[in-house]
Image (cartoon, coloured by chain):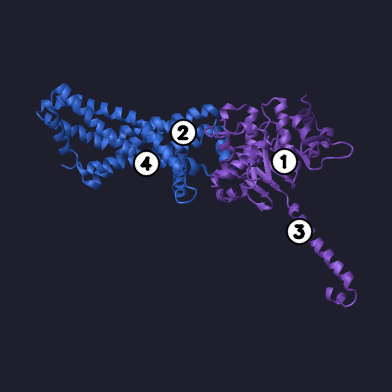
Chain colours: A purple, B blue
Amino acid sequence: MLSADLETEPEIIAEEKLGEIADIENAVDDSSRILPAIEFRDVHLSFDDKKILNGVSFTVRRGETKIILGRSGGGKSTTIRLILGLLKPDSGQIFVDGEDITHYTEEEMMRVRQKMGMVFQEGALFDSLSVFENVAYRLQEQGVDEETCEKEVRRMLQFVDLEDAIDKMPSELSGGMRRRVGIARALVGDPTIVMFDEPTAGLDPPTARTICELAIKLRDLEDVSSIFVTHEMNNLEYLSSEYATVNEDGEVIYEMEGENLCLINTEVIMFRDGEIIFSGKDEQLRKTDDAYIRKFIRGK
Amino acid sequence: MNPLKNFLFQLQEISLLVWRAFIGLFRKPRYFSETIRQMDLIGVGSLPIVLLTGFFTGGVLILQTFPTLQYYSIQNEAGRSVATSLVRELGPVLSALMVSGRIGSAISAELGSMVVSQQIDAMRALGTDPTRKLVSPRILALIFMLPLLTVAADIFGIIGGAIVASGLFNQETNVFITSVRAGITTEDLIGGIIKPLFFGLIIGSISCYKGLSTTGGTVGVGRSTTSAVVVSSIVVIIFDFFLSKAIQSIFDIGRI
């Protein structure tokens, strides 16, 4: 097709050819975003006779934040443990960046975990290590030199606004500070997927807000895909209606979605007894007629 | 799960844990500095209680046996009786029981606390194998240090026996020492070193398994700690019987 055209209108054909090349380049860029970051397909899991997950299916797109709501014991934290490979499902499939990790061995999962960060409830910091050693943990295990470790640790602690605590031990930190150090530790290595397992549980509202702001910064400024497990409606409010930008002075500011902007990169799923009973936007969640969901949102 | 099934399941899990810990020694990363740290904690840290145990065990052996030996006019063999009892049996077993109580409980409590506070999960999420990082150094340190602790206990036991023999029964020390030297054979010494090697493996593997399989929060940590000490102590005692028989058969000891 191209060679026949070359004999008649070379300039037009050259332009078409350049256009085709540009289309191909765009397609290559876009295809990396077509694959979901995380995908569950009909996952089932039981412990003894208790059904924990019953046919759970959902996806988390690139750069999307999925908020998982539900009561305690509903299967939320189990979902995260399955993605990390800490548990194996009884049936179904789990994909991370298009890779089927369902039956991966522990050694194969080590490679997949390099691109994931996990923020545990209450931080799960290593008691016998300082803040520096906790945050540098992954790098030190990989044998990275001390200078690079320090630089990276300071960068992460600056992100969570805790650089002054670098030499402290976890026992000297408040609950909120421990969570923030946990976030810094999870972000070392610049993971593309971050999971938060009830990171604001037990924290006062201002500190919980700080944690949510960190999650918003990751979503909007670092293009990280994330799962945010929570049962607190305030967190849903922050994550689904605010976005982070950088002003002219280089400061991060948080603005509300409004008439000019609607957040499309945050969705909500709700678990009940191991099943997903809602999946969609927060506006749809608030307008639902489902009595269970209305009671969960309003608390009565 | 019925008791037999439970026992077999735990035996399987402990065996798999030891296998993974052993295989991990041949792959990078290797945690050499952590192993040295554990050897210090286990070896140097347990030395005082092991020496005390050995010393007073040697002393009480002489206290109890000397009158009987004297009755049969073979009190000059007191040194031999203490030395063979200590080196073949009491030194390895009592040292193992002391270490099981001190170190076994510490290992299972530490690992159990890490499990309930999700530190083990965090370790795995950060790309570290907990078996290689936590279990291998501890088991290796116990296998290295328990024989050394046992030798120290034996020496102090003999010293304790000598002090009691000369202090309470007026036996000359050189008579006691001569009897000790006549009583201990190379086979006794080898057997007395082989036993602590196995005991170290038993204490390390059971304590690590109990710690890593903790469930039920802080109450669970207490339960698994108690279980680690009790189970490893019982297994040491039972295993000692079969190991003693095997050593006797190999080295032809105990035949008249």
Distance from Cα at disc 2 to Cα at disc 1: 38 Å
**Disc 2 and disc 1 on one polypeptide chain:** no
Q: Do the numbered discs 2 and 1 sit on residues whose CB atoms are within 8 Å?
A: no
Q: Dot 2: few (<14), some (14–19), or many (≥20) neighbours within 10 Å? A: many
Observer-side mark, 2 or 1, equals: 1
The amino acid sitting under disc 4 is Ile
- How many marks the image carries: the answer is 4
Tell me which numbered mark, 1 or 3, is placed earlier along the sequence.
3
Secondary structure of the residue carrying numbered label 2: helix
Please report the residue visible at 62 percent of the width from the left and 33 percent of the height from the top: A123
**Disc 4 and disc 2 on one polypeptide chain:** yes
Q: Which residue is mark 4?
A: B143
Distance from Cα at disc 3 to Cα at disc 4: 56 Å
Q: Dot 4: few (<14), some (14–19), or many (≥20) neighbours within 10 Å? A: many
Q: Position of residue B140 (x, y in %)?
A: 40, 42
Q: Nearer the viewer, residue A85 or B51?
A: B51
**Disc 1 and disc 3 on one polypeptide chain:** yes
Distance from Cα at disc 4 to Cα at disc 2: 17 Å
The amino acid sitting under disc 2 is Ser
Q: Which residue is mark 2?
A: B108
Observer-side mark, 4 or 1, equals: 1
Distance from Cα at disc 4 to Cα at disc 1: 47 Å
Secondary structure of the residue carrying numbered label 4: helix
Residue A285 shown left or right of residue A106 in the figure: right
Observer-side mark, 2 or 3, equals: 3
Which quadrant would residue A206 be assigned to in this image? top right
Q: Which residue is mark 1?
A: A218
Q: Do the numbered discs 1 and 3 sit on residues whose CB atoms are within 8 Å?
A: no
Distance from Cα at disc 1 to Cα at disc 3: 24 Å
